[in-house]
Image (cartoon, rainbow, N blue to C red):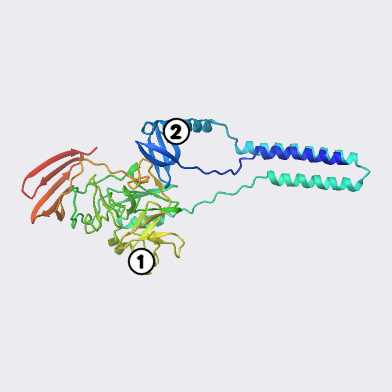
Amino acid sequence: MKQNTLFLAFLIFIPLSISTTIFAHVGERYSVKSETFYLNGQPIEGHFLMTKDDKIFIELSNGKSISASLTNFSFSNQNILSQKIARLKRLNTAKTLTKTERSSLRFSNFSIFFLLSIIVITFLFIQNRSNNQFSKYSCIFGSFIVFIYACKTTETVIPNASTPKTDPAFIETVFSSFKTLVKTRYDDTYFYVESEGIPTHNMMVGITSWQQQVPIPQGYTGTNAWSIPLKPELSDAPISLKTNLLKGAVAIAGNGVPIFNPLNNRGEDAFIIGELDQWGGHCGKADDYHYHIAPLHFEATAGKNPIAMALDGFAIYGSKEPDGTIMQALDTYHGHLINSGVYHYHATTTYPYFIGSMRGKITLDPTTIAPENQITPQAKMTPIRPAGEPLRGASITNFKSTGTNAYSLEYTANNLKGYVNYSWDATNKYNYTFIGTDGKSTTFFYIKK
């Protein structure tokens, strides 16, 4: 009797041990400890993320990513990183079981265990057929073990939770009042906005801190269109605009003009220091016109629709809620989730003006480093001339069209007037004439490629 019991336990233990060994890594989780790397002689804390196009990507302790060539790291780091890259290549070339193969393996293990259980039960029944009570209990016990094992090896499939998709028709309402300026389209992932980045309202007037840039078309079309995610997700760690995203756009206005961080690339409030015109915009180094505060003046034509869309996929409203009621209290990200259950931002006349932190998940361009990192995908601005220098004491007093594709900007410095007259033709040849407050004139020609 004792020998039979030990034999039964031994046979049951074998398949259970096999099962445990084979599936030991299912659901395994791990954590990565930060390491110290020396990049161009400077220490940084983080861990190796990946390698791509001969670049090493390091995820910093704050969650941001940077990239550099292997040779930019210290010799000791290069040795460690080379080992990590080699190990990663081996893992990527290792064979993994398909779902069908895993199911087949589970079925094979179950079949072996079931057959062994039947043999054990039959053996015990024959050996102890005179003891009917023992035979009955043996059958019950064996059946119970088979049932438990079957439950253990059954794979529970949980369907992936899908993120609700924003109705493209809703996003279309943001741009519906500017059809002469904006073209839109969408696929399953993004809603695309095409424009030249030039508004119908006047520009530049009121700027008191100017770097001699003037607005020209940018060509945000085709593959260079602005991309708005159709499946926005709330982030567990919203990225603050105070310490990030000082480069590039974070939203797109209803007229197709991008909206940048309220802070300039030096971390200063662009509005407070006089860099913005009466409409909240100015030109960047590529002569690209963009806003640094959400254009609240669009609210009159937008009605109950948003005035802009953030690049995390959430809408930006003006001073009222989507139902037309007075704006409710805002959270630290400058928005809230009320009524409809969909998060949205609001534009205000005080900092942070429209977004404090990106409430939605975004992808950071790994080639950029905080605070001058940026969201990707991101439309590109292409400069056609060298960036201008600050013109101290100058205030822009007038800006007007002087013909087809021709403009004149007037500025005042020391009570004297100066001008920038510029135009372009169908061949993308640009003509800039600078007339200083001393009356001297200088002309430059550029070709936009």
Say whether disc 2 or disc 1 marks the residue closer to the N-terminus: 2
Q: From the top left corner, tell me how far across and down residue 178 is, in percent.
A: 30, 55
Find the residue positioned furthest to the left: 439
Number of other residues with Cα within 10 Å of mark 1, as a class: few under 14, some 14 to 19, many 20 or more: some
Residue drawn 29% across the image and 59% down it: 295
Residue 298 x %, y %: 29, 60
Residue 404 visible here: no
Where in the figure is residue 285, as x and y percent of width and height?
23, 45
**In front: 252, or 44?**
44
At horizontal 44% and vertical 62% (from top left) the residue drawn is: 337
User: Label 2, label 1: how many angstroms apart (C-alpha)?
Assistant: 53 Å
> Which label sits in the foreground, 2 or 1?
2
Element type at mark 1: loop
Q: Amino acid at mark 2?
A: Leu
**Quarter-wise, where is residue 142 in the image?**
top right
Q: Amino acid at mark 1?
A: Lys
Please indicate whether residue 166 sits to the left or right of residue 393 in the image.
right
According to the picture, the residue beneath numbered tag 1 turns out to be 320
Q: Residue furthest right?
A: 130
Question: SS at mark 2?
Answer: helix
Q: Is residue 440 visible?
A: yes
- Label 2 crowding class (10 Å Cα cut-off): few <14, some 14-19, many 20+? some
Tell me if label 2 and label 1 are in contact, CB under 8 Å: no
Task: In the rendered structure, find residue 81 and report the number of the disc placed on it.
Answer: 2
Q: Up-down: is 343 above or below 107?
A: below
